[in-house]
Image: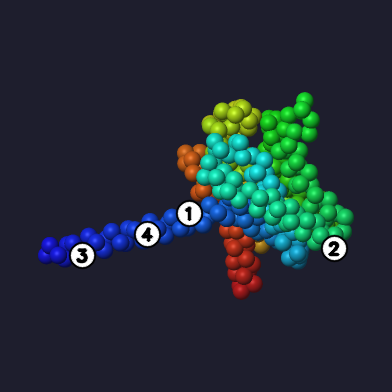
Amino acid sequence: MTRLSGVTSYLNIIETSLRNSSYEFLRRFFIIISSSSLFIAISGCFKTYLSFSLYNTPQIYPLLFTTFLVIYSVYGLNKITDIKEDQLNNPERTSFILKYKPLFKYSAGLTYFLAVLIGCFYGWKVLLIILFPLLAGIMYSKKLHPSIPRLKNIFPVKSIIVALSWTVGNTFLPIVNGKTSFQVMLFIFYFFFIKSFINTVLFDLIDYQGDKVIGVQTIPVVVGPERTILLLLFLNSTMSILILICVSYGLFKPLTLPLIFCLIYCYLYIIYFYKTNNRLRMELLVDGEWIFLVFISLATYTSIQYL
């Protein structure tokens, strides 16, 4: 009996070790794809895919790939320029970036060059859309003059610039060579802007302590975490009114369910991450939201066609 108990105990130790090692492997894997901006770039492709679906226009896959390249490049460069802040807010990512800093620099430059090259085949409008995040990123991260502070340090310009960088591409890439109604374009612009703004401010909430120490004037630092959460919940509530208007006018019929899911899901993660200070989990659940939404959209389309 003693020997059997010893074997059982040994097996339990092995099982626990395997479980822990699997978790650690997945955690390290996600840290790598998150720190290298691969995950947010992939998620950005799904976000643009959803935008094409909202406009009900055929997907242009080279432009989706261009979205991936631009996001990877801009976020990669931003992580290099923000090393000082990230040493306080995200030391694990900072050590990874410092270790592979030359690789980040060269890969970011190469990917943006490829994005511009692809954009040349689709005209000057696409080029303007592609260049907007780069120009915004430079103004956001760099001091253009000693007497002018970085946009990142001006309240609440940082959150607006980041949200606009996302929104311009998501709103205008799908219709760059086509036409749509002003009402549809206005809804899509507002939808992506509010979602991007909420997510940006929510990440600032995670960085609250570090930003407060170094004097970055984010919304959580200026108005406090509690009021920030109320603001985000209010902004998300405006989406519910907009979705009701769209439903009443028969807009985005196949995507009504994904939009409602997006609304509810946003409420849940705002409340959840107010109490849970876990950046890795936030990047997975918040940045990964667009991946979930696209799969829900595809499932909805399939169900409608089947019925």
According to the picture, the residue beneath numbered tag 1 turns out to be 27
As drawn, the label of residue 125 is: none
Structural distance between the alpha carbons of marks 4 and 2: 49 Å
First of labels 4, 2 by sequence position: 4
Structural distance between the alpha carbons of marks 4 and 1: 12 Å
**The C terminus is located in which quarter?**
bottom right
Q: At 30% across and 61% down in the image, what residue appears?
A: 14
- In screen coordinates, is 71 left or right of 210? right
Structural distance between the alpha carbons of marks 3 and 1: 30 Å
According to the picture, the residue beneath numbered tag 3 turns out to be 7
Q: Amino acid type of disc 2?
A: Phe
Q: Nearer the viewer, residue 34 or 249?
A: 34
Residue extending furthest left? Answer: 1
Q: Secondary structure at mark 2?
A: loop
Image marks 4 and 1: residues in contact by CB distance under 8 Å: no
- In screen coordinates, is 183 left or right of 209? right
According to the picture, the residue beneath numbered tag 4 turns out to be 19
Q: Amino acid type of disc 3?
A: Val
Tag in front: 3 or 4: 3
Structural distance between the alpha carbons of marks 2 and 1: 39 Å
